[in-house]
């Protein structure tokens, strides 16, 4: 089975061809980071315009790199939601046009299901499974009993982790996206400011990062008022320690409560060195297999959409020509 995947939910225009849901044949990603950098975040109007300019080229390149013709494909899978509505619409309409022109089935994929299925491009998924999706727009813990069975057991009540990273980075005058810069500073620091750990109610798997972000901002503000010089690396390390400790703690507790066979993480923040090494060491100690896909599959890409779309295609879950971008699409199981 060969599936063409298309992803345009945020600021990456991406197309990919995946074989049998497990093997990448081609994977093209056009990033817009340079265009959004000077605004310190993704500007929806600019994102949409870039997607319009790039989408046809990116799809053609994915076919060319795979040395395939459209008639050799079995279906087109596209991110239906969630995401920026104007951005989603470009991908959905490109997918509909392609499917119509080449008489292919259309499959609408949930972006988070895509992030989870990115793992399947590198190793087989074992169930029951616990997945963390941690990125600029999402922080969610998902329990899966089997393929296509998703239960969201925890999610952020305010900012996504990546969003908090980017906002804290901004106050430290680091360039956008700030996550990697904080990570680097934290790694090099010999000291860490003590910021609070936001655990929420006992037993909750939800997250909250806005309180932590405010603590960091208050710390900076107070230091500035007293005329003290702050050490950015101490702030970065303190912030990162808090995020890593809470995320690791909640994941470990969930993995044990749900007795999972495998734990996976995905999303841009899963690239974080501190988080990676913390998760690797606790799950190694508990002897629970833990995986993070390689970086290009952690961040937004279309191979993950094709991988998830393959399982949906096999289940006969086709969309129609009435498909629309769904910015608030819920993650539902593929029954
Ligand atoms: P979505 O939530 O829809 O996937 P997104 O495009 O914002 O949207 P990604 O592209 O997966 O998400 O990830 C980008 C985010 O990851 C940014 O917030 C960025 O700062 C963060 N990030 C990247 N590398 C690191 C790192 N090493 N440490 C912490 N955060 C990081
Ligand atoms: Mg992105
Ligand atoms: Fe994403």
Image (spheres, rainbow, N blue to C red):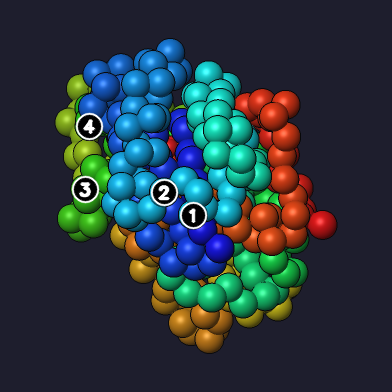
Q: CA distance from mark 2 to mark 4?
A: 44 Å
Q: CA distance from mark 2 to mark 1?
A: 6 Å
Is label 3 in contact with label 2 (beta carbons under 8 Å)? Answer: no
- Residue located beneath label 3 in the image: 185
Q: Nearer the viewer, mark 1 or mark 3?
A: 1
Q: Residue at x 65, y 60 (%)?
A: 311
Q: Mark on residue 69?
A: 2
Quarter of the image with the N terminus in it? bottom right
| Sequence-first tag of 2 and 4 | 2
Is label 2 in contact with label 1 (beta carbons under 8 Å)? Answer: yes
| Sequence-first tag of 1 and 3 | 1
Nearest the viewer among 269 and 19 is 19
Quadrant housing residue 278: bottom left
Q: CA distance from mark 3 to mark 4?
A: 10 Å
Is the C-beta of the residue carrying label 4 under 8 Å from the nearest atom of ligand 1?
Answer: no
Nearest the viewer among 335 and 136 is 335
| Sequence-first tag of 3 and 4 | 4
Q: Label 1's element?
A: helix
Is label 3 in contact with label 4 (beta carbons under 8 Å)? Answer: yes
Left or right of 56 on screen, residue 236: left
| Sequence-first tag of 3 and 2 | 2
Nearest the viewer among 246 and 113 is 113
| Sequence-first tag of 4 and 1 | 1
- Residue located beneath label 4 in the image: 174
Q: Residues within 10 Å of mark 4 (few under 14, many from 20)?
A: some
Q: CA distance from mark 4 to mark 1?
A: 46 Å
- Residue located beneath label 1 in the image: 72
């Amino acid at each position: 089975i060969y599936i063409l995947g298309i992803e345009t939910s945020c600021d990456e225009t991406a197309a990919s061809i995946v074989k049998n849901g497990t093997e990448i044949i081609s994977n093209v990603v056009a990033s817009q980071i340079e265009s959004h950098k000077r605004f310190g975040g993704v500007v929806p109007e600019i994102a949409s315009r870039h997607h319009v300019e790039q989408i046809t080229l990116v799809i053609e390149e994915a076919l060319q790199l795979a040395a395939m013709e459209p008639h050799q494909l079995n279906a087109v899978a596209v991110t239906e939601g969630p995401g920026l509505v104007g951005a989603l619409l470009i991908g959905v309409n490109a997918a509909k046009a392609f499917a119509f022109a080449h008489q292919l089935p259309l499959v609408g994929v949930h972006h988070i299901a895509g992030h989870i299925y990115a793992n399947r491009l590198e190793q087989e998924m074992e169930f029951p499974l616990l997945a963390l999706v941690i990125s600029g727009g999402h922080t969610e813990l998902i329990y899966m009993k089997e393929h296509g069975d998703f239960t969201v057991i925890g999610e952020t009540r305010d900012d996504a982790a990546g969003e908090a990273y980017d906002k804290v980075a901004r106050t430290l005058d680091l360039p956008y996206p700030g996550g990697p810069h904080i990570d680097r500073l934290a790694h090099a620091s010999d000291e860490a400011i003590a910021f609070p750990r936001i655990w929420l109610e006992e037993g909750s798997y939800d997250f909250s990062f806005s309180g932590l972000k405010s603590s960091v901002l208050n710390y900076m503000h107070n230091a500035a008022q007293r005329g003290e010089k702050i050490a950015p690396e101490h702030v970065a390390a303190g912030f990162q320690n808090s995020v890593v400790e809470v995320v690791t703690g909640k994941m470990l507790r969930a993995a044990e409560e749900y007795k999972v066979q495998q734990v996976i993480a995905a999303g841009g923040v899963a690239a974080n060195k501190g988080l990676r090494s913390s998760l690797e060491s606790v799950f190694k100690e508990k002897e629970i297999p833990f995986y993070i896909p390689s970086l290009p599959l952690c961040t937004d890409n279309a191979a993950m959409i094709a991988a998830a779309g393959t399982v949906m295609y096999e289940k006969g879950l086709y969309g129609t020509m009435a498909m629309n971008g769904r910015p608030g699409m819920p993650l539902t199981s593929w029954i």
